[in-house]
Amino acid sequence: MTSQDVEGLLHRLAPRALGTVVRRFGNFDTAEDAVQEALIAAAEQWPRDGVPDNPLAWLITVGSRRLTDLLRREQARRRREDTVASWRLSDDWCSPPADRPADADDTLILLLLCCHPALSPASQIALTLRAVGGLTTAEIARAFLVPEATMTRRISRAKQTIGNSGVPFRMPPRSEQAQRLAVVLRVLYLIFNEGYASTSGPHLYRADLSAEAIRLTRLLHQMLPDDGETTGLLALMLLTDARRPARTGPDGTLIPMDEQDRTRWNAGYITEGVSLISAALPCGTTGPYQLQAAIAAVHDEAPSADATDWPQIMALYEVLMQTSDNPVVALNHAVAVAMVRGPHTGLGLVEQLATDGRIGQDHRLFAVRAHLLEMTGDHAAARQAYHAAAQRTTSQPQQRYLYTQAARLPDPR
């Protein structure tokens, strides 16, 4: 097996190994360090010596031994002395509890733990990418354009918060599961969005970050195949990411959806996404991720921009607006209304949103306003709005695109 094959295998096994070690010993912070050491050892040894017959068990055993070594070196701290003293260090010291099989997959519990409600959304994202996604601290820091030292502190504080919470490593009570799962889905959604449309920096997207979000959501869907919102989120990611190959030109210039070469869209992702959302929608309550996936499916199945079923998209956004008070959804609804009922009607809805403090100064609102003003023929106002949008975004590709759109329009001076 090549080094690249080993790397892929370790990426898949890492969250399961960490989940098992945390479950057995209950120390998230030190367990994460120990499993990382086991992964490094495997990356060095397996390409040379061969992959063991049971690679997951190998990682768990080595990680458990590393954990014991780490704790032994910290025995000056009384709490850890007591903990270590309570463990059995005989040959069967790493055997799992009787009620939990040795090969049990604890990834879902690990996801729920990383998305602990006591953590801030930024910490939830960072910890999920570190512990479940397997990204290094440096990679996470680069993805969110912060210094590595800042991200190290953020992750360390998150681990300490979980450790101090005293929450046991087990599935939350049934009464809490729905809320905790909703947080997990939101974190995965945020990770995907940051990868698909980076909020700042020189690149329009981070393909590795959106791919990681899709991988983790696939994993979650495998564990919860009957959960409609998990299915909806996976479908939404696939249907959205399907357009990525056509979103930029050869020089990295942003290309809006209505101008994209749809033959470059990922047909496999579209087929899979449509299949997922078609199966989920008739079953149970329809949630916001399912509705967003349905909207994405309408876009992706249109053979051309002119053939887009805007009335259906408008109707879906109206249902979505009933489920949550989200100003971005309302802004997208305004665009759909403009496409169905004309730009003046859409502009009226945009102006209502301008008083909403959550989005009133967001570059997206100014960009939509500019586009609709251009559709009405008011080029002077559109040019001004494009400039205002460009000044408010921290994404360099989006900024260049908005300034280019403004430059296309005649200057009234």
Image (spheres, rainbow, N blue to C red):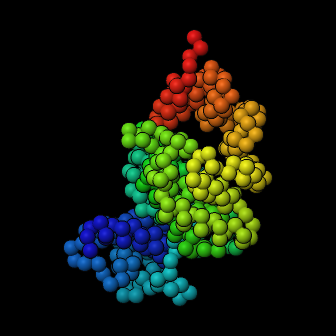
Residue for point 76% across, 35% down: 345
**Quarter in which the C terminus is drawn:** top right
Viewer-nearest residue: 235 or 343: 343
Residue located farthest toward the top when viewing the structure as drawn: 413
- One can see residue 284 in this view: yes
- One can see residue 156 in this view: no
Q: Image quarter for residue 94? A: bottom left
Question: Against 101, is 378 above or below?
Answer: above
Residue for point 42% across, 54% down: 208
Residue located farthest toward the right when viewing the structure as drawn: 322
Question: Against 200, is 184 above or below?
Answer: below
Question: Against 164, is 61 above or below?
Answer: below
Residue for point 70% across, 44% down: 336
**In the image, residue 338 lies at what x, y percent?**
71, 39
**Quarter in which the N terminus is drawn:** bottom left
**In the image, residue 135 lies at what x, y percent?**
41, 58
Viewer-nearest residue: 95 or 300: 300
Report the number of numbered marks: 0
